[in-house]
Image (cartoon, helix red, strand yellow):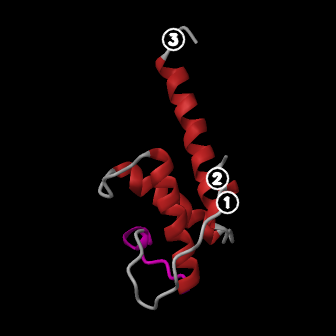
Amino acid sequence: MSVAERPMALPPETEGEHMPITPFLDGYSFDPETRRVMGVAFELARVALQLEDRGDSLNAILARRIVELAQEGERNPDLLCENVLKEFSERRSEIARMDDPAA
């Protein structure tokens, strides 16, 4: 079952709450609901990629891509997550091909 197919409840919206993605917003201003949705997508993607350390550069890349997709208008946390995971998978495949001269 893909992330987009799994049922989930979004956390309640709380004014001023620090979302996990907040440090990666780089000065961009989003409404509280969009920040919440991006935070959920970020956490879903982190779990799927088994990322633990939020200081990891991979977390920053992941978060920035989610922010970019949200800037483009996507507001569904499942689709934000799925799109980022798909891009990571494609890039991982490209890197593996470059590292394997026999491929």
Mark found first going from the N terminus, 2 or 3: 2
The residue pinned by badge 3 equals 101
Q: CA distance from mark 2 to mark 3?
A: 29 Å
Secondary element at tag 1: helix
Residue depicted at 54% across the width and 82% down the height: 30
Q: Nearer the viewer, mark 1 or mark 3?
A: 1
The amino acid pointed to by label 3 is Pro
- Left or right of residue 51: residue 44: right
Q: CA distance from mark 2 to mark 1?
A: 6 Å
View extreme (bottom): residue: 15
Badge 1: how crowded within 10 Å, few (<14), some, or many (20+)? some
Badge 2: how crowded within 10 Å, few (<14), some, or many (20+)? some
Q: Position of residue 7 (x, y in %)?
A: 65, 62
Q: Tags 2 and 1 in contact by the CB under 8 Å rule?
A: yes
Q: Main secondary structure of the magenta part?
A: loop
Residue 48's place in the image compared with 33, above or below, is above
Q: Position of residue 93 (x, y in %)?
A: 57, 29
The amino acid pointed to by label 1 is Leu
Q: Nearer the viewer, mark 2 or mark 3?
A: 2
Quadrant in which residue 97 is drawn: top right
Task: Point out the stretch of residues depicted in magenta.
Answer: 21-31
Badge 3: how crowded within 10 Å, few (<14), some, or many (20+)? few
Q: Quadrant of the C terminus?
A: top right
The residue pinned by badge 2 equals 83
Query: Residue 79 has which mark?
Result: 1
Q: CA distance from mark 1 to mark 3?
A: 34 Å
Residue depicted at 40% across the width and 57% down the height: 60
